[in-house]
Image (tube, rainbow, N blue to C red):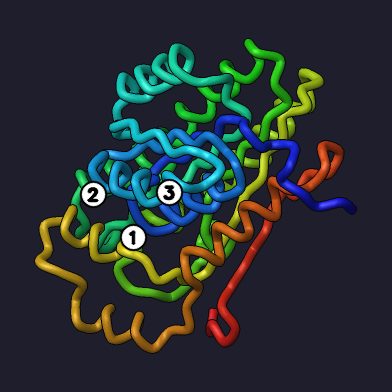
C-alpha cells in the first residue's frame, strides 16, 4: 500500500478546535505537508500566532473564529471558505470538551455543553463539509477525533456524560460510512481514538464548569498515567490521509505503552 499525502498538496483542510492541543498539532502537521488549513476555534488569537510561526512552511493556516456549538458560526465559516479559498477536501473534527462532575448530581448546563460540542457540533460541521465536497465533485476525507472512551467505559471519576458523547461519535462514524456507501459517494470517513493525551482539555473543562482548576485527586491520577502527545495523534491523522483512495481506515485506536485501561 502506497502511503503519501502528496495528492493532497495545495488542497484545503478544515480543522475544528485548532487553537490548542491536538487540533493545533494537526493544523501544524497539515500545513507542513502543504495543505491550506482553515482553523476553526473560539480563540482566534492563538491560531493567528500559530499561523505566523508557520509562514515559512509549504502550506498556509487561515484562522477563522467560530464556536462549533453555534450553527450560525459554522455556516459563516463555510461561506467564508467558499468565497476565499478552494473547495474543502479534508475535514478534521477535533473540537471536543469534557466536564467536571458526575451523573448523580452534575450540572445540566455542563452536559448540554459537552453534547453540543462533541456530538451536535461535529454533525453540523460534517454536514456542511459533505455538502461543500459534493457540490464541487470532491472525493474528500473526514476524520473524527474520537477517544478510547468511545469504545469502553474507563473507571475514572467525574467523566459523567463524556464517554456517552464519544460513543456517539463511534456510532456516527459507522452510520455516515453506510450512508455515503448508499449514495455511491467516494468520500471517506475515519475515526481516531486515542487514550490519554496530555493536553489542556481537563483544565479547560474544569474552568468551564466553574472550578478553579483540576481537582487534586484527578491531577494526581493524570500525573501517574502514561500519556500520548498531541503530535502522536497528528501523526496518526496524517497516516490515515496518506492512504490511497481505495483504502479506508475506519477506526484507529492508539494508546500510550503501559496505559492501564
Distance from label 1 to label 3 (Cα)? 38 Å
Mark 2 or 1, nearer chain start: 2
What residue is pinned by disc 3? 54
Q: Which is closer to the viewer, label 2 or label 3?
A: 3
Q: Secondary structure at mark 2?
A: helix
What residue is pinned by disc 1? 160
Q: Is residue 42 left or right of residue 168?
A: left
Picture coordinates of residue 233, whole percent (x, y): 55, 61
Figure check: 81 above or below 197: above
Picture coordinates of residue 38, whole percent (x, y): 44, 33
What residue is pinned by disc 2? 110
Distance from label 2 to label 3 (Cα)? 35 Å
Residue at horizontal 60%, vertical 42%? 34
In the image, which disc is placed on residue 33? none
Disc 2 and disc 3 in contact, CB within 8 angstroms: no
Picture coordinates of residue 199, whole percent (x, y): 36, 66
Residue at horizontal 35%, vertical 80%? 222
Q: Residue furthest right?
A: 1
Disc 2 and disc 1 in contact, CB within 8 angstroms: yes
Q: Is residue 201 left or right of residue 258?
A: left
Amino acid at each position: 500500500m502506497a502511503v503519501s499525502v502528496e495528492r493532497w498538496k495545495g488542497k484545503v483542510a478544515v480543522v475544528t478546535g485548532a487553537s490548542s492541543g491536538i487540533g493545533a498539532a494537526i493544523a501544524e502537521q497539515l500545513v507542513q505537508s502543504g495543505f491550506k488549513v482553515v482553523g476553526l476555534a473560539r480563540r482566534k488569537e492563538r491560531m493567528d500566532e500559530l499561523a505566523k510561526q508557520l509562514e515559512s512552511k509549504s502550506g498556509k493556516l487561515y484562522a477563522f473564529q467560530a464556536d462549533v456549538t453555534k450553527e450560525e458560526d459554522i455556516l459563516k465559516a463555510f461561506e467564508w471558505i467558499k468565497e476565499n479559498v478552494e473547495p474543502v477536501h479534508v475535514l478534521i473534527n477535533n473540537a471536543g470538551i469534557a466536564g467536571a462532575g458526575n451523573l448523580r448530581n452534575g450540572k445540566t448546563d455542563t452536559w448540554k455543553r459537552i453534547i453540543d460540542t462533541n456530538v451536535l457540533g461535529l454533525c453540523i460541521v460534517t454536514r456542511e463539509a459533505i455538502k461543500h465536497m459534493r457540490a464541487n465533485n470532491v472525493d474528500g476525507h473526514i476524520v473524527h477525533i474520537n477517544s478510547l472512551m468511545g469504545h469502553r467505559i474507563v473507571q475514572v471519576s467525574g467523566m459523567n456524560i463524556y464517554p456517552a458523547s464519544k460513543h456517539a461519535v463511534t456510532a456516527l462514524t459507522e452510520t455516515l460510512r453506510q450512508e455515503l456507501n448508499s449514495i455511491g459517494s467516494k468520500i471517506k470517513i475515519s475515526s481516531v481514538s486515542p487514550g490519554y493525551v496530555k493536553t489542556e482539555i481537563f483544565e479547560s473543562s474544569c474552568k468551564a464548569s466553574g472550578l478553579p482548576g483540576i481537582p487534586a485527586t484527578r491531577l494526581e491520577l493524570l500525573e501517574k498515567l502514561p500519556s500520548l502527545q498531541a503530535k502522536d495523534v497528528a501523526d496518526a491523522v496524517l497516516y490515515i490521509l496518506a492512504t490511497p483512495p481505495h483504502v479506508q481506515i475506519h477506526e484507529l485506536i492508539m494508546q500510550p505503552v503501559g496505559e492501564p485501561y
